[in-house]
Image: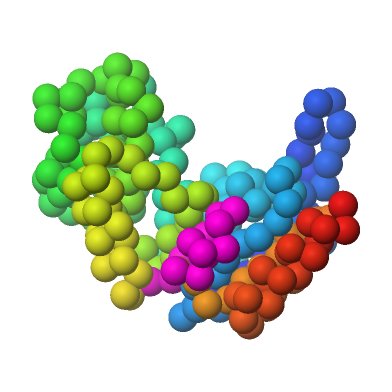
Amino acid sequence: MIRLENATKLVRMKGVKKTIIDDVTMTIPRGKSIGLLGRNGAGKSTLLQIIAGTLDLDSGRVIRKGKVSWPLGFAGSFQGSLSGEQNVRFVARIYGVDTDELVEYVAEFAELGEFFRAPVRTYSSGMKARLAFGVSMGVKFDYYLVDEITAVGDTNFKRKSQKAFKERLRDADVVMVSHSPSTLRDYCETGVVLEDGMLTYYDKLDEAIAVHENNLRRR
C-alpha cells in the first residue's frame, strides 16, 4: 500500500509557483497496477518522484508499506565519478540485496562490456539508461514506478527488457505514466487522473482514460 495523507506539493515554474497536488489524501492499493494520467505539465513525473521518496512534500506525508522503486530507467542519481559497477554496489547496500549477485546481474543485463568499470560520466545517455534499467530489474520491488517506457538499445535488448519487466510484474504492481492509452492498457487495470492539483482514483482504467480525454477537450 502507498498512501498520501494531506499531501501538498508546490513547484516554481518560470518564476511562478504552481500547485502540483493540493491537500490530497489517497490510497494506492496493493494488487492493482495503476495508470497515472494528466495533461502536460500537470505534475505526473513530480508525483512519481514524491512516491519514490526522491522529492519531499511541502506538507503532509507519504506512507509506504512495501518496497517502492525509483522511477524506472531514471539515471539522474548515478554518481558520475564512480564506475557503473561501483554505482551498482552502492545501490545494493542501500536496498539490502546481495552485492555480488546484483553486480553480476546488471553486468550481464546491461551489456556495457568494459564500460561497466568506467566512470558513468563517460557514458552516453543510452548507456546510462541501460545501466539504470538493469539495476531496476535486478532489485525486486513491490511497486515499480514507470515514467514513460523508453525503448533502449537494439531489437534484442528491447525484447529482453520487456520480458524481464513483465516477469517482475508477476509479483509486483506498477504505477505508470504514459501518454499512450494502449501502453497503459498493456500493463494497468486501474487509473488515477491528476487535474488541477487533485487526484481521482478509478477502479477501471478505461474510465480514467475517458475522464482524462474529456479534460483535454475542455481546454
Could you tell me if residue 35 is visible in this image?
A: yes
**Residue at 30%, 17% in the rendered image:** 122
Whether 178 is among the magenta residues is yes
- Residue 175 place in picture, x, y as percent: 52, 63
Residue 194 position in % (x across, y down): 73, 60
Tell whether 215 sits left or right of 68: right
Question: In the displayed structure, does residue 163 sit left or right of residue 40?
Answer: left
**Rendering quarter of residue 142:** bottom left
Left or right of 73? Residue 83 is left
Q: Is 189 left or right of 45, judged from the image as shown?
A: left
The residue at the point 48 percent across, 61 percent down is: 183
In this rendered view, identify the residue nearer to me: 192 or 215: 215
Most foreground residue, 53 or 198: 198
**Residue at image point 26% right, 68% down:** 167
Residue 123: horizontal and vertical position, in percent? 30, 22
Q: Which residues are magenta?
A: 172-186
In this view, 79 is above or below 159: above
Inspect this view and state whether residue 9 appears: no
Q: Quadrant of residue 173?
A: bottom left
**How was this image coloured?**
rainbow
- Position in image of residue 96 (x %, y %): 28, 55
Total numbered circles: 0
Q: Going 79% across and 56% down the picture, which residue do you hit?
A: 216
